[in-house]
Image: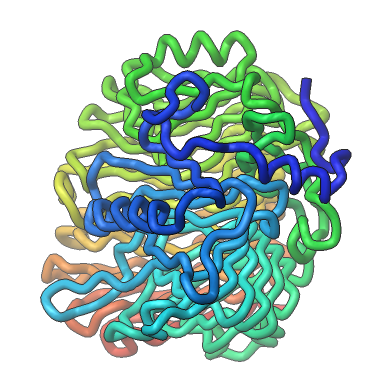
Amino acid sequence: MSLRLRHLPAALLLVALSVVMPVTHGSENADSFPFGPQVYVFNPRMPLEQIQKIVDRIAAAQSDNQFGTDRYAILFAPGTYGTRQHPLSFKVGYYTSVAGLGGSPAEVVINGTIQVRNRCTQGACQALDSFWRSLSNLTINITRGDDACLSDQTWAASQAAPIRRLQVLGGDFKLFDACSQPGYSSGGFIADSQFSGAVVNGSQQQYLIRNSRFTHYSNGVWNQVFAGVYGAPNGCDGAKSCPYSTIGHTPRSREAPFLIALPEGGYGVFVPTVQNESAGPSWVDHPTPGTLIPLSKFYIAKPSDSATRINTELRSGRHLLLEPGVYHLDQTLLVSNPGTVVMGMGFATLLPERGQTALAVQASHGVTLSELLFEAGAQESPDLLRIENAGWSAVSREDPTTVHDVFFRVGGPHVGRARTSLVVNADDVILDHVWAWRADHGDGTGWTQNTADTGVVVHGRGVIAYGLFVEHYQRQEVLWDGEDGTVIFLQNEMPYDVPNQESWRETAQTEGYPALEVGPGVRRFRGVGLGSYSFFNQGQPVFASQAFKVPPGLASGSLENVLTIFLSRAASGGIRHVVNETGGASTTANADIAVRVSRFPAP
């Protein structure tokens, strides 16, 4: 049966957890270790040199593995790692998740740093492609070695690199790399975290921070959004050049599930409860409310498992934990039981091989999806993830289906095709950090190769999205026709590779397609901090008539701080209006300058 973590005294939990986990790797103790060879669990009694060697080896292997198939989970049992004299400092590469196994971030302390740094090629250093990695549920006590730059607490990452349940002590937390010819980082997500110092934005272009606390946030660039954050900037107050959007309380949210070590031995997955009108981290003043599910209630899937086997386990009522790796699916994975948890480790990747939907949710309420990467196959899928209500449920708002750190990729490693990446045809769903990406580089990319119409389609009522990143789709990037919808932060890039204007028109009179189109029947919709950027690289002048298209009749101020940017003086075309016919153009004439509409419709 499920356990309630908040019923366990914190001191007892810490002591109990500190004596478990004597094993570091699946291959070393296959009889008792429940995970496979791509999962490493470290114990504070291990020699620091051994830990350092392993994490450095993984980082080196994954540093340039942008489209590779290796995936890793690095887990730390409760305790302290490193000292002031001998810190534990390491980098996090592609497809690597790093997490503590305590009941709160305070129970795993890293004296050192955990970093993402710029990637340098041909003399240029930047973080624009530093995707697919994560950091969660531990404390970093910044401890510098001999080289201050190499021991900065730097997380110079872009999309699909979430930070959750993190505590940082002893210095500032940098969202860009200040030490290697600092180039832009391009987007990120932080939730349920606390920083004793400042969060230094630097050259980070856009960011969403939710339910967190810090002392100061520096120099926003284009679009920095804060929801339920203590210490956040005051917001823009209508200023045309201000990049900040600040919401005092997060309307409705649920933190992501996380793996912990159980006091009696073994593991469990903790699922937090829903919060309404919340602010600050969930764990600072009291344990995070929620339910702890023993790992015995989960089927632990391996990449070699068939879709038939996984579906059999799901039908039987088990939850699903996916080990790191790529899952080649010959049928749709079907989640039909309310309350099912589907959780990936190390960016477990679902790839449909026969043009089917990769995963479908058909449950009335309470399903949780976390840390999954959906990758389109060569045969076109109608969609990659579909969420539907199996009949109306009165409890869907109290116990909604939630999606945390779920990412989509069409093209990049190979040719991929999917008409839509994510379809939400259910009410009250919470999307908590989604990146849907039609690849603009890598293998199998091009206007007629990695084809994809739309990133996200929302039909359900009361759906709310935090941190929605949707890029390069060939028609509307986001279609939203569900009533009472909310989007808090959107980052969009229109497709780069449009061959010419005639190839890209919504109607004969409308150039291009909007980044976000709200359906004509919708009367209530809220959008805060929505940004759409354009750059057309085929040598043709290509325009979009507007970045955001909404129906008449929305309440005054339904959209707040929406913006467009033209990304390069070397291209032509652009976006003619920000929203409907309002807002000026962003073209080569004002490249790299945000064109904003502070409120729409205007008061």
Give the residue drawn at x 21%, y 77%. Answer: 572
- Viewer-closest of 321 and 12: 12
Give the residue drawn at x 11%, y 70%. Answer: 539
Considering the image in quadrants, where does the C terminus appear? bottom right
Res 231 quadrant in image: bottom right
In the rendered view, would you say 43 is above or below 237? above
Taking the image as drawn, is residue 413 in sight?
A: yes
How far across and down, in percent of the image, does residue 261 sit? 65, 38
- Viewer-closest of 506 and 302: 302
The colour scheme is rainbow
Number of labelled discs?
0
Considering the image in quadrants, where does the N terminus appear? top right
Side (left or right) of 208 relative to 283: left
Res 110 quadrant in image: bottom right
Give the residue drawn at x 39%, y 52%. Answer: 50
Taking the image as drawn, is residue 405 in sight?
A: no
How far across and down, in percent of the image, does residue 308 sit? 41, 10
- Viewer-closest of 458 and 439: 439
Side (left or right) of 310 relative to 330: right
Side (left or right) of 569 relative to 507: left
How far across and down, in percent of the image, does residue 156 sit? 40, 71
How far across and down, in percent of the image, does residue 66 sit? 25, 53
